[in-house]
Amino acid sequence: MDDKIREVVEQYELNMKNVYRVRGAYILDTGEGLRILREFRSTEQKAEFAQNVKEGLRERGYPYTDLYLRNREGNLITENVMGNRYVLKHWFMGEECNLKSEKQVARAAENLGKLHIMMRGMTTEPMTFQADTFAETLIKHNRELRRVRSYIREKKQRNEFELLFLSIFSEFYQEAEDAESMLSNIDGSVLYQQLNTQQTLCHGSYNYHNILFTSEKIATTSFERAHLQLQVMDLYDFIRKLMEKNNWDFSLLQTVLDNYQKICPISKEEKKLLYIWLIYPEKFWKITNFYYNSKKTWMSGKNIEKLQGLQQQKKQRMSLLEKVPEILQV
């Protein structure tokens, strides 16, 4: 074990047997079970909030989370002499959710529904939703898309990424405009009143990396992005990434919706919002955003491949979106 890691571990009460290096972390085998040590780049406040959520889930009958351990001083975050900050968490022997397995996808969707039911009214003090409304978010995104297009158009010399971006911009921007215009069909006041009344929390990062299948149950990890939000946005994030990994397979979308809703039904307004976000070309916006906030003189081949992948999947994606209104009845 590296000295810098040993220094951190020694600040905890542990009966350590073995240490295993994994990607970006250390697995500690202790007499009380597995623990994982990771570098932590967020705030103490975020860590404490995530801990409160996980403790709340445990109290409501869901113990399978990566609960933090406090060090000898009672803190969640531990620093070494170099100023690097770490957290130590409970961990599980298991495998990440396989998005190619319909059975695991179904169980992951059901697991999300259970979490969402439990993550309502959990906060000890009422919070007020203060982030941008969905309309404001889409307007900002679309403004940024136009800004990047204008920037690239004005360049005298364009690289491969920029040429490809301009060639496909119109088709994806049309989707973005369609999504923005459809928001007028949603009664946002009803959704936000529901959000603030029920105090619904989102996991914030419910993807296959954070869904572990153990020999007993499904463990859910990484609650650092948990926040007050409409829970349908967690469902949307899971669906979008699932669809991207499976070439927008209609049957998997149906599987997710069926298994989630048998635990946690979706309201009519939430279904409308889910449909609008599925229409919105978020992956295209994310690639654009990354380009705009990076060194524009060079873009890796991977980002070019991502744009090409979006274009190649467009037909399958549009085919699925044509069926979504019937599934959701919107």
Image: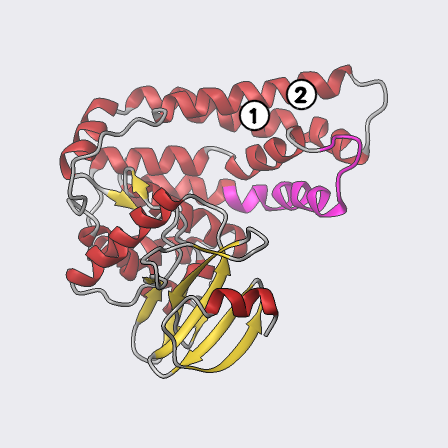
Image height of 112 relative to 132, above or below: below
Q: Is residue 100 something one can see in this rendering?
A: no
Q: x and y percent of residue 135 in the render?
A: 37, 22
Image height of 222 relative to 125, above or below: below
Q: Is residue 165 left or right of residue 96?
A: right
- Labelled disc at residue 215: none
Report the predominant secondary structure element of the magenta stretch.
Answer: helix
Q: Name the one closer to the observer, 262 or 6.
A: 6
Is residue 19 on the magenta stretch? no
Q: Which residue is mark 1?
A: 173
Q: x and y percent of residue 243 in the render?
A: 48, 51
Residue type beneath disc 2? Arg
First-in-chain label (1 vs 2): 2
Q: Where is residue 198, by image quadrant?
A: top left
- Mark nearer the viewer, 1 or 2: 2
Q: Are marks 1 and 2 in contact (CB under 8 Å)?
A: yes
Residue type beneath disc 1? Tyr
- Residue at image point 36% right, 52% down: 223
> Start and end of the magenta stretch?
295-317
- Labelled disc at residue 149: 2
Please state, as top left, top right, bottom left or bottom right, where the C terminus lies in the image: top left
Disc 2 crowd rating (10 Å Cα; few below 14, some 14-19, many 20+) is some
